[in-house]
Amino acid sequence: MLKLLAPLLTSLAAGEVGLVVSRAKQSAIFAAIIAVLVTIGAIFLLVAAQISLAEHYGPLYAALIIAGSAFGLAIIAYIAMKIASSSARRRQEERAKVDTSTVLTIAALAVAPALLRSRALLMLTVPLVAFGGLSLAGKKKKRRPRNDPSAGGGI
């Protein structure tokens, strides 16, 4: 039965893959055309800004204004990129901590039946589990005192 369905499934999959590839090519071509047209539009917009600013401030100052604006926007974009990458890195580190604790918990649960069978290992495991639980419970964030008169807040 599977031998009869294999050619049919293969032809369906090949047809779907070909369709997806042709759509991707078409989308890439249109994206390239759009990018070229947007670039041409941006260039002519800058030329129009140059002409307009040159009428009011002169050609040198017009060029300096446009260059300064471009550098300012580049600095703003760089700062935004740094902020986004640092927040993404922080999220990745938090995810890694959660993944590590999950793996350790799963490993502990997988080993638990073997440890519970042996009385000697059980006697060794109980203090280790208690110590681990206390160490996890002891990790609390330090809070600032609310109204500490010695901190100078009551002046």
Image: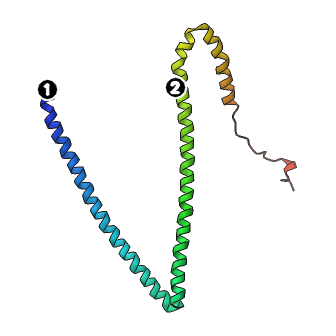
| Rendered position, 28 above or below 139 | below
In the image, 118 versus 152, the foreground residue is 118
Image quarter of residue 123: top right
| Rendered position, 141 above or below 80 | above
Dot 2 surroundings within 10 Å: few (below 14), some, or many (20 or more)? few
Tag 2 residue: 106
Q: Residue at x 70, y 40 (%)?
A: 141
In the image, 155 versus 3, the foreground residue is 3
Q: Residue at x 40, y 75 (%)?
A: 42
| Rendered position, 119 above or below 153 | above
Coordinates of residue 4 in the picture (x, y in percent): 12, 30
Q: How is the image coloured?
A: rainbow
Lower sequence index among marks 1 and 2:
1
Q: Amino acid at mark 1?
A: Met
Q: Amino acid at mark 2?
A: Ile
1 and 2 marks in contact (CB < 8 Å)? no
Coordinates of residue 113 in the picture (x, y in percent): 52, 14
Tag 1 residue: 1
Dot 1 surroundings within 10 Å: few (below 14), some, or many (20 or more)? few
Q: Is residue 133 left or right of residue 39?
A: right
Q: Is residue 153 left or right of residue 25?
A: right
Q: Secondary structure at mark 2?
A: helix
| Rendered position, 111 above or below 66 | above
